[in-house]
Structure formats: structure tokens, C-alpha cells
Image (spheres, rainbow, N blue to C red):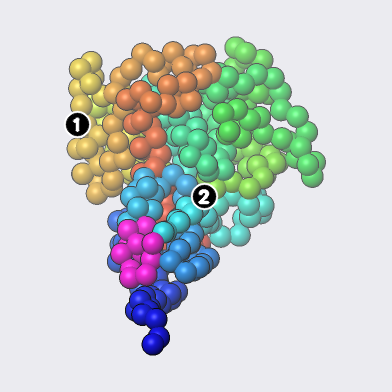
Amino acid sequence: MLPNRSPQRETMSEVTEAEVLQALRAVQDPDLHKDVVSLGFVKDVKICGPAVKFTLELTTPACPVKDQLKEQARQAVAALDGVETVNVNLTAQVKSSLGPSDLLGDRVRNVIAVTSGKGGVGKSTCAVNLAVALARQGAKVGLLDADVYGPNVPIMMGIEGRPSPGTNQKIAPKEAHGVKTMSIGYMVEDGTPVMWRGPMLHRALEQFLQDVDWGELDYLLVDMPPGTGDAQISLAQLVPMTGAVVVTMPQEVSLTDVRRAIAMCQQVKCEILGVIENMSGEVFGRGGGHKTAEAFGVPLLGEVELDPKIRAGGDRGEPITISDPDTEAGRRFAHIAGQMAAKVATRQIQSLPVLEV
């Protein structure tokens, strides 16, 4: 008599790559309004028995919903029959919105102007903190101080001294907090006025773009001088801009000027990525940025409350996004940087126009 044998356990078949991809089609990017498979985000799918591993390659390391997308992707695949463990590797590859550009050596993917209609609204503070916030999230970032009449980037970034020679007979940008920077403030003595007419300003901006060894950058933020003058026109002539971020304060006197700045950007074919309302709160009020964004049909990227720590950090060369990133202001700047990067990622035009005048 044969010994009793327990019935053999029915083995479950291994999940296929096609099934994994089909499951991931349920995961939608809320900014691009398409699923992660159609967008080409899913890379390197590997299946070993009940274990599935793949890479989710997003359009920016500063994606504001990256953790949400990663968890949704993990859950979608984990729900498949036969899957016991899911490993999602999150990476990012920032795409270029620029066409061929000799000035930037085809290595800078996006140029973003940070501008305002008037001075004193904290434009440079926003530019510095946005640049640092992007760098902290893993992006390759440069910051060009185009405000030659009032260069504040060296102080706010805590950088002193003249730049050194770089490769290929170019100037090496000075770096701090993970951000490559260039400013006329490195070239002149403290307190020395820069008294240039339009053609000299145009040439200086051209040299900052052409003769600086920026290397490979995901984002080059340009801290523009206030107003709607020569620097704005020159930048639009010299390089295709991905877009502009407009900084305003809440009160009406600031909003009147910022509307002019938005109109100027539209005239030079520079898309408005969004508006930042800076120094909002009890002193200057709030809501003006939202009103302006709504009137022009552009996004409100966020509001930053008036906070003495922001001023103190700028004075000592430690932006709040590096010195106190977990404060409300630090988190606000990080959120705005993510929103800005998301707006850049949604652009469909790959070759942007250069203004001809």
C-alpha cells in the first residue's frame, strides 16, 4: 500500500511585465494629466518570482507629488496576483525646453527669470531661496544675478572674492549651498556704483551667459533687476527663456507695477510660470497675489509670510531654505520651488522663440 501524500500545493504563475505596465496605467501625473506609462516614466522593470522592481523617472527631482506617485505605483503593482514585494526606485530627468543655444553650450535645460515690477518686494530673496530649495531636492541649479545696479546675490549666498578661471577659457561660477552663481558683485569693490547704459548692460549679460562655465544645469534662475527695462529685453534677445516667475507684495501699489511686469513678459514672448506673493500677513495684508494671478489667468505659486528669519538669513548668507528649512517660511519656499518645477515640466514647446527687435 502506497503511503498517503499530501496534495501538491498549486504554484502561482509569475506576473508578467505587460501586467505590471497595465497596472501602472492607473497611476496619473496630476500636472501632466497622463498616466506614468504613457509619459515614459516607467523604466527597468525587473521581475523575480513574487518580487517586482522598477524605476519611476520623473521630470524633476522637485516634483511636489513625487512621494504620492511612488506610493500609488507601489500599491498598483502590489495588488497584482502573485506579487509579494514591490521596490520602486525614484529618479528624475529634467527635460530641456531650450533649442540650440551657443551662449549656453546646449547644457542648460531651462532658463527662468525671477522678476518684479518694482524694487523692495523681496525678488532677490525669492530667487535665492528658490534656487537653494531646488538644489536641496537634487536638481542642478545655477543663479545669475542680472541686477547689475544692485547685486545682492553675493551677500545673500554668503560668497566673497572674485571668481576663478574655469575650463575652456571661461570663468568658473562661485558655488554655495549647492548652487552655482555669477554676479557683477564679484567683480567690483563693495560700495562701487555700476553706471552702465543699455549696450553695456546687454554686453555684460551676454558675457555672463556665454563666458561662464555653467556646466550642466537643470535650471538657471536669473535674478532680474526690478522694472521693465533694458535687462529684461536683453535677456529675451540673448536666450530662449523657459518662463518667468513674478514676485509681488500684497498691497495695491505693488500690484499695479507687477501687472506691468506681466504685460512686459507677454510682449517678449516669455510665459509666466506663476506669481509669488511675498511678505503677506498683517503688516502688508494678503490676497493681492491671488487677485493678480486670477486677473491674468496665471498660476499663484504660493504665498510667503513676512518673517524676520528670512531677512536675518539673507544678511548672514544663509538662506532660510538652508538654515531653517523646516520653518513655515522654509517649507513655503520649497513648495513654491516644486510648483515652479512642475509648471516647467508641463510645457509642451521644446524650442522656445528668441525675441527679435
**Residue 291 visible in the snapshot:** yes
Question: Which residue sits at x=19%, y=31%?
Answer: 287
Q: Nearer the viewer, residue 12 or 145?
A: 12
Residue 83 included in the magenta stretch of the image: yes
- The image's mark for residue 287 is 1
Q: Quadrant of residue 160?
A: top right
Is residue 60 rendered to the left or right of residue 249? right
Q: Nearer the viewer, residue 356 or 49?
A: 49
Residue 69 included in the magenta stretch of the image: no
Magenta segment range?
73-84
Question: Which residue sits at x=48%, y=54%?
Answer: 89
Question: Which residue sits at x=24%, y=27%?
Answer: 250
Q: Nearer the viewer, residue 107 or 119?
A: 107
Is residue 141 rendered to the left or right of residue 247? right
Mark 1 neighbour density, 10 Å: few (under 14) some (14–19) many (20 or more): some
Q: Is residue 221 above or below residue 27?
A: above
**Residue 123 visible in the snapshot:** no
Residue 272 place in picture, x, y as percent: 36, 47
Question: Which residue sits at x=48%, y=61%?
Answer: 53
Residue 218 place in picture, x, y as percent: 54, 47
Q: Which of marks 2 and 1 is nearer the N terminus?
A: 2
Residue 33 place in picture, x, y as percent: 30, 62
Q: Distance between the residues labelled 2 and 1?
A: 30 Å
Inspect the image, locate mark 1, and give the three-letter code of the amino acid beneath it. Answer: Gly
Q: Disc 2 on helix, strand or loop?
A: loop
Is residue 101 rendered to the left or right of residue 228? right
Residue 172 place in picture, x, y as percent: 71, 35
- The image's mark for residue 110 is 2
Q: Disc 1 on helix, strand or loop?
A: loop
Mark 2 neighbour density, 10 Å: few (under 14) some (14–19) many (20 or more): many
